[in-house]
Amino acid sequence: MAHTLLPGEVLAMTGQAVDRLLKLGDGDAALLYLHLLRHGSLSGLKWTQDRLQAALERLRSQGLAPAQELPPPEPPAQELPPPEYATEEVAAALADRASLFSALADEVERRLGKKLSAPDLKKLYTLYDHLALPPEVILMLVGWCIEEMERKYGPGRRPFLSQISKEGFVWARRGIDTMERAEEYIAKLTRLRGREAEVLRLLDISPRPLVEREKTYIAAWDDMGFEDEAIRMAYEKTVLKKQSMDWGYMNGILRRWHEKGLHTAAAIQAGDRDPRPVRAGGQVDRPPTADQDQRVREDMERMRRLMEEMKREEG
C-alpha cells in the first residue's frame, strides 16, 4: 500500500494557500510553493531561470511568494544530449511491425505535406524513443507547431522538424506526456496567446513575438485578474513616469494594486492613494513599520515559522 505521508516528513499548509494554488491551476507554481515550504529557499531547485521566474510571478500574483528577490538556486544540471541514432536504427524501427513509429512517421509526413528526410526521421525518433513521448502526444505537438507557424507566417506554412523537436524537449521538461496534459497545456497557451495580443494593443505595441520575460509578466497579470482598463491605466502611469514603456516598473504598479485588491479602473480610481514610489524592477518602497502586507503574506510567514520549528527539532 502506498504511503501518502511518511513519518517525520509531514508539512502543513493553510486552507487559504491551497485555495490560491488551486485557483492558479499551475503545476510549476504548486511545485515551487511546496519546495519553498519544505526548504525555505530555492536551494537544490534545478530549474531553468525562465521556468523559475514564471512560477515565482504566478505565486506572487496570489501573495504566496515574497516580493523581494530570492537567492538564486543552484545552476541546473546540464541536460544530457540525445543519442546519435544511426540510420540503421531508425530503419529498423520503421520496419518493426510491433512499433508504432512507422505509422507515426506516415502521419507526420501527411500533416507536414512532405517526405521526411533521414535527419528528419532521426529527430522524430528522438521524440519517440529518447523522450518516450507517446505517438498521440507527438501528433498534438506537431499540430500545435503547425498552428503556430501558420499564425505567424500565414496559411500553408509548415515548421521544420528541428522546430518541432525543440518544442518537444520543452514539453518533456514540463512533464507533458499524456493527451490530457497536452490538451490542458495547449488550451492554456491558446488562451494566453490571445491575451498577449490584447495586452500588446493596450500598451500601444504593434503585434510581434514576445520574449519570455514579457510573456511571464502578461501571464502574471492575467492570473491577478486585471481588466483591460486597469492595465491601460498602469501603462499610462508608467509612460508618464518613465517616458517610455518599462515592463518591470509597470509590473510593480500592478502588483501594488493587486495587493490592495484593486483590479478594475473604478476601484483603482477610488482606492489608489498609495504615495509610495515604485522602484525599478517592480518593487515599492515600504515604511519599515508598515503592516499593510500582513494579510497577503501570512502564508509565507507561517512557512518561515514552520521551517524554523523543523530545524530546531532536527537539531
Image: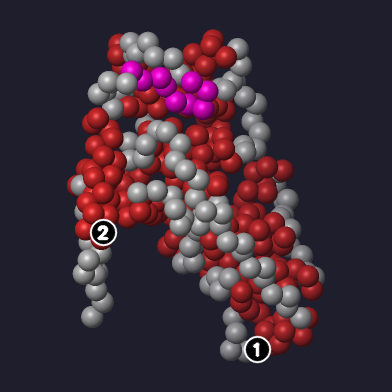
Residue plotted at (46% across, 19% down) = 278
Q: Is residue 282 magenta?
A: yes
Q: Is residue 69 magenta?
A: no
Q: Report which residue position mark 2 lands on.
A: 315
Which one is in front, 240 or 309?
A: 309
**Vertical order, 35 against 120 (above or below):** above
SS category of the residue bearing label 1 = loop
Query: Residue 40: x, y in percent?
Result: 35, 49
Residue at the front extreme? 315
Q: Which residues are magenta?
A: 279-287
Label of residue 76 in the image: none
Looking at the picture, which amino acid does disc 2 mark? Gly
Q: Report which residue position mark 1 lands on.
A: 96
Quadrant including the C terminus:
bottom left
Q: Main secondary structure of the magenta part?
A: loop
Query: Residue 168: x, y in percent?
Result: 60, 61
Quadrant including the N terminus:
bottom left
Which one is in front, 256 or 148?
A: 256
Name which of mark 1 and mark 2 comes first in the sequence: 1
Which one is in front, 201 or 11?
A: 11
SS category of the residue bearing label 2 = loop
Residue plotted at (56% across, 35% down) = 214
Query: Residue 293: x, y in percent?
Result: 28, 27
Which-is-in-front pick, marks 1 and 2? 2
